[in-house]
Amino acid sequence: MAQRAALAHAEAGDPDAAHAELAPLAAARFAAVPHDNMWLATLALAAEACWRTGDIELGARLLPLLAAHAARNVTVGAAVAFGAAGRPAGLAAALAGRLDQSVSLLDAAVAANRRMGSPLWEAAAQHDLAEVLGRRDGPGDAERAEALAATASATGTALGVPRLAAPVARPHALAPRGLGA
């Protein structure tokens, strides 16, 4: 439940409250999270909250846990899917400052979400990949980020998902703040 509250705080623009919700879960490398059918989804939602608030400290702790499951689909039972685990792993990698790894994980998440026929999660991964490419700012990254952002925005508009339809954040807006450090 804490991961959902953290994500709600992140979406409401309250990074301190999001961090406070996640900190107890993060103790001892997220050992407090039960290894049950909610484990991967809990970590994925925690990574999303960390990404949206720029919480480097907790986001980086999630990287090894999520990266090990990057090729899996994040599900809760048989009814709810959160797309490829490579997406939250890619977000955690970006928070850890491992931008090349983040791009690789997000590229794989885009492809996996496309293969599973999920335009929503494909667009979410494209949107996040565009943000990370903008932050990495390597050769060709700006052009690729622009194309990915346009595709994600068109899908977001078609699906009625405002976060995906909105412009991708500029690189300077992505500088994490490192809460709780």
Image (spheres, rainbow, N blue to C red):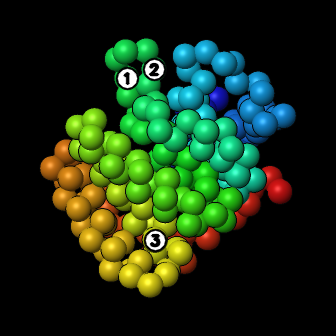
Residue 6 visible, this angle: no
Residue 50 in the image: state x and y as whole percent: 61, 49
Which amino acid does the dot numbered 1 rest on?
Val
Which label lies toward us, 1 or 3?
3
Earlier sequence position, callout 1 versus callout 3: 1
Q: Residue at x 47, y 47 (%)?
A: 87
Q: Amino acid at mark 2?
A: Val
Mark 1 and mark 3 in contact? Answer it, CB < 8 Å: no
The answer to which quarter of the image holds residue 4 is top right
Q: CA distance from mark 2 to mark 3?
A: 30 Å
The mark that comes first in sequence, 2 or 3, is 2
**Direction left: furthest residue:** 158
Mark 1 secondary-structure assignment: strand
> Can you identify the residue that label 2 sits on?
76
Tell me the distance, in whole angstroms, between the alpha carbons under discs 1 and 2: 5 Å
Query: Residue 64: where, in percent of width, then height?
Result: 68, 44
Q: Residue furthest bottom?
A: 139
Q: Residues within 10 Å of mark 2 (few under 14, many from 20)?
A: some
Marks 2 & 3, CB-CB < 8 Å contact? no
What element does badge 3 sit on?
helix
**154 and 91: which is toward the camera:** 91
Q: Are marks 1 and 2 in contact (CB under 8 Å)?
A: yes
Asked if residue 23 lies left or right of residue 41, the reply is right
Residue position marked by numbered label 3 in the rendering: 133
Residue at image position (73%, 46%) is 61
> What residue is shown with label 1?
80
